[in-house]
Amino acid sequence: MGKGEVGMRQFIEDVGLLYGEMGFPRMARRIFGWLLLCEPPHQSAEQLANAVEASKASISSMTRLLIQMGVVEKIGIPGRRDIYYRIRSGSWSELMRNSLANMTDMRKLADRGLELISHRAPESRQRLQEVRDFHAFLEREIPSLLDRYEQRRRKEQ
């Protein structure tokens, strides 16, 4: 195994560790890490299985999960029978916009909780108020950050 291959395997594992803390299953993390580095950028199920040392069944279920999450897409290549998988371009903004919906839900939930304890002293509402304020801030600020990122990305393409 060459130095470059060892470095790539370590990168895949490091991506896996990072995304493991976010709840991704281990094999999905490894597939994701590989798809960030591989050449060509699209890989068949067999290529993925060989690269991350997994069964085709595991590749099938984990690529399905990554597709549902919106970070991977399936593609066909004219003249080839296999289906290929690759990182979906533009998926990062979409993922963040989807996360924003969760932030809005949390802010609304905190608003509801604050109504329930509105009769309490400010000190006893402080924890929930902080949760509410944090999520309200993100809810206001993230859309403009995403818009700026997408504008910048369009200019660079």
Image (cartoon, rainbow, N blue to C red):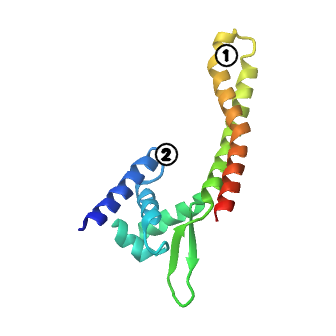
Residue 90 found in image quarter: bottom right
User: In this image, 75 relative to 51: left or right?
Assistant: right
Q: Quadrant of the N terminus?
A: bottom left
Residue 4, given in percent of the width and then of the height, sits at 30, 65
Q: In the orientation shown, which residue stands out farthest toward the front?
A: 156
SS at mark 1 in the image: helix
- Residue at (49, 72) in percent of width and height: 41
Tell me, for residue 125, which label it has, or none: 1
Image location of residue 5, percent across then percent down: 30, 66
Q: Quadrant of residue 34?
A: bottom left
Which residue is tagged 2?
A: 22
The residue shown at (36%, 55%) is 13
* Nearer-the-camera pick, 6 or 70: 6
Whole-angstrom CA distance, mark 1 to mark 2, is: 29 Å
Q: Amino acid at mark 1?
A: Arg
| Residue farthest along the top direction in this orientation | 121
- The count of marks equals 2
Residue 4 vs residue 68: left or right? left
- 40 to 37, vertically: above or below: below
Q: Position of residue 6 (x, y in %)?
A: 28, 62
Under circle 2, the secondary element is: loop
Question: Where on the picture, by quarter, is residue 26?
Answer: bottom left
Say whether disc 1 or disc 2 marks the residue closer to the N-terminus. Answer: 2
Disc 2 residue type?
Met
Q: Give residue 111's position: percent from left, percent from top.
A: 74, 27
Q: Is residue 122 above or below residue 59?
A: above
Which residue is painted at 70% across and 24% down in the image?
113
Within-10-Å neighbours for mark 1: few <14, some 14–19, many 20+: some
- Label 2 crowd (10 A; few <14 / some 14-19 / many >=20): few
Cβ–Cβ under 8 Å for marks 1 and 2: no
